Each structure stands twice: as C-alpha cells, then as structure tokens.
C-alpha cells in the first residue's frame, strides 16, 4: 500500500490533531460521530448517510458502512470503500464516489457556525492505487436557493479537503466555501444565501484516473461537527 501524498487544495492550514474541538464553544452541532451503531446521524435534522458513485457506471454502487478504525478510539467511524473505472474512450471521466447526508427537517442555517470540522483519511487501494492527485471535496448543497436567473438548479458551494492516508482533523472555515468554478450559474444571494439554506452535506472524491485505468480506495470519516 502506497502512501497518499498530502494534497493541499485550500488556502488554510490544517490545525490541530485528532478530532478535537472546543467543547466549551457555545455554538456546536455534532452532525454525526458514528458511535451509535447506525448510519443515521446523531443530529435528527439530517437523514441517513448514503454512498454514491460519480461517473462510474461500470462499477458496483458503493456502499458505506460503520468501521472500528477511528482516530479518537471511539467505537466507530464511517467507511466508504470504492472502485472507479475510467472507460477506455480517450477521455478522463472524472469518476469517483462520495457519501452524503440530507437535511430532513428543513434547510439548516450554517452561518450560525464558523467552521465545519471532521476527521478524515483516504487510503489508496493496493493493486489499483488512486492517483496521487485524487481530490476530495466537501459540497454543501442548497437546493431551495435559486440561481440569479430565477431557476432552481441544485446549487451548492464547495471547498477542497486536504487529506493523507492517516487520520487528520480538518476544520474548514465556512466563509471560505464558494460556488464550484465548473458551474457557471451564479447563486442568487451568493455563497451566504447557500450557507443559510444547507440541505445536503456531501463528501465527494474525484479519483482523477487517467483514461482506461481502475482505482480503488477507502474514505474514512468521523466526527462531522459544526462549530
Ligand atoms: Ca466515531
């Protein structure tokens, strides 16, 4: 198994180690710590974690499970094993996989918090390693917020997630999220409007496989917290 390189995607420094957060903070929302034996988030405002494939129709649909490998010696974390196949067609399909939870009791105002933090690691598959430039994104969806054109277009804001093949505590400052550059439809009210109406939280992997290659990996995730 090869070591994944540190991928730096955002303009912040990863601070601290190991799932620690300020328990004295007045504003704290634990979305999930995966310790209660199921994939239903601890916060009742979010629905069960669901895995999904991205542009990889040739592969079996990924499934997420609970796993005892944790950073903080807690009972469990989320594990998303995945295989991505890039079809031989002279194109790079940007296939990948992800895991998401959706808001079930109405959109959540994330601007009441400063950061979304989590423990994460991405382990590459042995015989079919992921490219070292594979990307992890955190996408915050705001499907009720229209585009400036007035259309509803399942908009979201995104931030790159740094990762290694070891557990890391990653806090992402919410104001540093922004619309993905590959979507050209401006959000009505901009990033703030989206952050005020978040109805999905999605950890997405773009395996960055070259044409015709197969990549395997496992995403580990724990302690998803708004703070
Ligand atoms: Ca845990």
Image: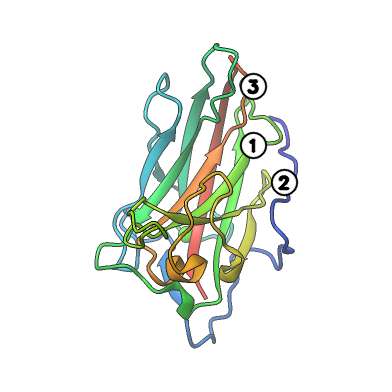
In the figure, 81 relative to 21: above or below? above
Query: Circle 1 sits on which residue?
Result: 134
- Image location (x, y in percent) of residue 227: 52, 76
> For this view, does 182 lie left or right of residue 66?
right
In the figure, 4 relative to 71: above or below? above
- Dot 1 and dot 3 residues touching (CB under 8 Å): no
- Dot 2 and dot 1 residues touching (CB under 8 Å): yes
In the figure, 30 relative to 215: above or below? below
- Image location (x, y in percent) of residue 216: 56, 28
User: Based on the displayed image, in which of its 4 quarters is residue 117 positioned?
Assistant: bottom right
Q: Earlier in the sequence, mark 2 or mark 1?
A: 2
Mark 2 vs mark 1, CA separation in Å: 8 Å
- Image location (x, y in percent) of residue 191: 51, 66
Q: Residues within 10 Å of mark 2 (few under 14, many from 20)?
A: some
Nearer to me, 39 or 97: 97
Q: Residues within 10 Å of mark 3 (few under 14, many from 20)?
A: some
| Residue that protrudes farthest toward the front in the picture | 149
Whether ligand 1 has any atom under 8 Å from the Cβ at mark 1 is answered as no
Q: In front: mark 3 or mark 2?
A: 3
Mark 1 vs mark 3, CA separation in Å: 11 Å
Query: Circle 3 sits on which residue?
Result: 210
Q: Residue at x 49, y 57 (%)?
A: 186
The quadrant in which the N terminus is found is top right
- Dot 3 and dot 2 residues touching (CB under 8 Å): no
User: Based on the displayed image, in which of its 4 quarters is residue 173 positioned?
Assistant: bottom right
In the structure shown, which secondary structural element does the residue marked by tag 2 occupy? loop
């Amino acid at each position: 198994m090869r070591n994944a390189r540190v991928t730096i995607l955002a303009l912040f420094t990863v601070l601290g180690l190991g799932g620690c957060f300020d328990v004295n903070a007045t504003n704290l929302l634990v979305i999930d710590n995966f310790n209660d034996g199921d994939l239903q988030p601890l916060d009742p405002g979010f629905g069960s974690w669901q895995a999904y494939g991205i542009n990889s129709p040739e592969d079996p649909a990924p499934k997420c499970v609970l796993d005892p490998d944790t950073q903080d010696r807690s009972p469990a974390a989320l594990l998303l094993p995945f295989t991505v196949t890039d079809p031989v067609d002279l194109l790079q399909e940007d296939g990948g996989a992800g895991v998401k939870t959706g808001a079930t009791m109405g959109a959540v105002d994330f601007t009441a918090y400063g950061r979304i933090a989590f423990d994460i690691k991405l382990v590459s598959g042995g015989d079919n390693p992921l490219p070292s430039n594979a990307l992890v994104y955190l996408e915050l969806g705001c499907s009720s917020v229209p585009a400036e054109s007035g259309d509803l277009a399942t908009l979201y804001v995104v931030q790159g997630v740094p990762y290694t093949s070891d557990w890391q505590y990653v806090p992402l400052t919410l104001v540093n999220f922004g619309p993905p550059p590959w979507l050209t439809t401006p959000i009505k009210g901009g990033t703030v409007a989206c952050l005020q109406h978040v109805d999905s939280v999605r950890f997405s992997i773009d395996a960055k496989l070259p044409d015709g290659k197969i990549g395997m990996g496992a995403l580990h995730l724990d302690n998803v917290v708004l703070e």
